[in-house]
Image (tube, helix red, strand yellow):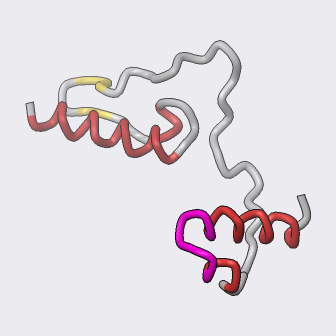
Protein backbone atom coordinates (compact mmCIF):
# COMPACT_ATOMS: atom_id res chain seq x y z
CA UNK A 1 0.00 0.00 0.00
CA UNK A 2 1.34 3.46 -0.91
CA UNK A 3 2.22 5.81 1.95
CA UNK A 4 -0.41 8.35 0.80
CA UNK A 5 -3.13 5.67 0.81
CA UNK A 6 -2.04 4.34 4.18
CA UNK A 7 -1.96 7.86 5.64
CA UNK A 8 -5.47 8.61 4.35
CA UNK A 9 -6.80 5.37 5.81
CA UNK A 10 -5.08 6.05 9.12
CA UNK A 11 -6.53 9.57 9.31
CA UNK A 12 -10.03 8.13 8.88
CA UNK A 13 -9.45 5.60 11.65
CA UNK A 14 -8.03 8.30 13.93
CA UNK A 15 -11.00 10.57 13.16
CA UNK A 16 -13.32 7.79 14.34
CA UNK A 17 -11.43 7.69 17.65
CA UNK A 18 -10.53 11.35 18.22
CA UNK A 19 -13.00 13.31 16.11
CA UNK A 20 -12.81 15.08 12.74
CA UNK A 21 -9.83 17.26 13.76
CA UNK A 22 -7.63 14.14 13.39
CA UNK A 23 -8.06 14.38 9.60
CA UNK A 24 -5.89 17.52 9.73
CA UNK A 25 -3.04 15.96 11.71
CA UNK A 26 0.32 16.06 9.97
CA UNK A 27 2.00 12.88 8.85
CA UNK A 28 5.55 13.18 10.11
CA UNK A 29 7.34 10.05 8.92
CA UNK A 30 6.83 6.46 7.80
CA UNK A 31 9.23 3.68 8.71
CA UNK A 32 9.31 0.38 6.82
CA UNK A 33 10.81 -2.20 9.15
CA UNK A 34 11.84 -5.46 7.52
CA UNK A 35 11.33 -8.53 9.70
CA UNK A 36 9.73 -6.48 12.49
CA UNK A 37 8.20 -9.58 14.07
CA UNK A 38 9.69 -13.01 14.79
CA UNK A 39 8.88 -15.85 12.40
CA UNK A 40 5.76 -17.74 13.49
CA UNK A 41 5.39 -20.96 11.56
CA UNK A 42 2.15 -22.91 11.16
CA UNK A 43 1.86 -25.59 13.82
CA UNK A 44 4.18 -23.77 16.22
CA UNK A 45 2.98 -23.87 19.86
CA UNK A 46 1.05 -20.77 20.90
CA UNK A 47 3.48 -20.27 23.77
CA UNK A 48 6.75 -21.83 24.84
CA UNK A 49 7.35 -22.66 28.51
CA UNK A 50 8.27 -19.46 30.34
CA UNK A 51 10.00 -21.04 33.33
CA UNK A 52 13.20 -22.69 32.16
CA UNK A 53 14.71 -23.60 35.54
CA UNK A 54 14.57 -22.46 39.14
CA UNK A 55 15.12 -18.70 38.96
CA UNK A 56 15.40 -18.67 35.15
CA UNK A 57 12.49 -17.34 33.07
CA UNK A 58 11.92 -15.98 29.58
CA UNK A 59 9.32 -13.66 28.15
CA UNK A 60 8.69 -11.67 24.99
CA UNK A 61 6.81 -12.04 21.74
CA UNK A 62 9.32 -14.62 20.50
CA UNK A 63 8.22 -16.90 23.40
CA UNK A 64 4.62 -16.79 22.18
CA UNK A 65 2.88 -15.44 19.08
CA UNK A 66 4.51 -12.38 17.47
CA UNK A 67 2.74 -9.27 18.77
CA UNK A 68 2.92 -6.55 21.40
CA UNK A 69 0.11 -8.36 23.23
CA UNK A 70 2.19 -11.52 23.55
CA UNK A 71 5.23 -9.55 24.71
CA UNK A 72 3.20 -7.87 27.45
CA UNK A 73 1.26 -11.01 28.38
CA UNK A 74 4.35 -13.17 28.79
CA UNK A 75 6.03 -10.42 30.80
CA UNK A 76 3.01 -10.22 33.08
CA UNK A 77 2.96 -14.01 33.43
CA UNK A 78 6.62 -14.14 34.44
CA UNK A 79 6.09 -11.28 36.91
CA UNK A 80 3.22 -13.24 38.47
CA UNK A 81 5.42 -16.37 38.70
CA UNK A 82 8.14 -14.32 40.43
CA UNK A 83 5.68 -13.03 43.04
CA UNK A 84 4.42 -16.52 43.88
40 lies above or below 67:
above
Magenta part of the protein: which range?
15-21
Q: Determine the residue located farthest toward the left in the rendered image.
A: 84
Q: Is residue 84 above or below residue 15?
A: above
The answer to whether 43 appears left or right of 78 in the picture is right
| Residue 28, percent from left and from top | 70, 84
Q: Where, quadrant-wise, is the C terminus in this rendering?
A: top left
Judged left or right of residue 68, residue 78 is left
Nearest the viewer among 10 and 72 is 10
Q: How many marks?
A: 0
- Say if residue 67 shows up in the picture: yes
Residue 57 placement (x, y as % from top left): 30, 33
Name the residue rendered at 70%, 18% in the picture. 42
In front of the other: 60 or 8: 8
Residue 28 in view, yes or no: no
Is 84 part of what is drawn in magenta? Answer: no
Outermost residue to the top: 43
**Quadrant including the N terminus:** bottom right
- Horizontal and vertical percent for residue 33? 73, 60
Q: Quadrant of residue 59?
A: top left
Point 50% across, 47% down: residue: 68
**Dominant secondary structure (helix, strand or loop) of the stretch shown in magenta:** helix
Does 6 sit above or below residue 66? below
Q: Quadrant of residue 40?
A: top right
Q: Is residue 71 left or right of residue 66?
A: left
Using the image, determine if residue 48 lies above or below residue 24: above
Residue at the farthest right position: 2
Residue extending farthest to the front is 20
Identity of the residue drawn at 44% across and 43% down: 71
x and y percentages locating residue 63 in the rendered image: 47, 32
Amino acid sequence: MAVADLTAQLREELAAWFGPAARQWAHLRTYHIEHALPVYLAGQPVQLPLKLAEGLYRCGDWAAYPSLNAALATGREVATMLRS
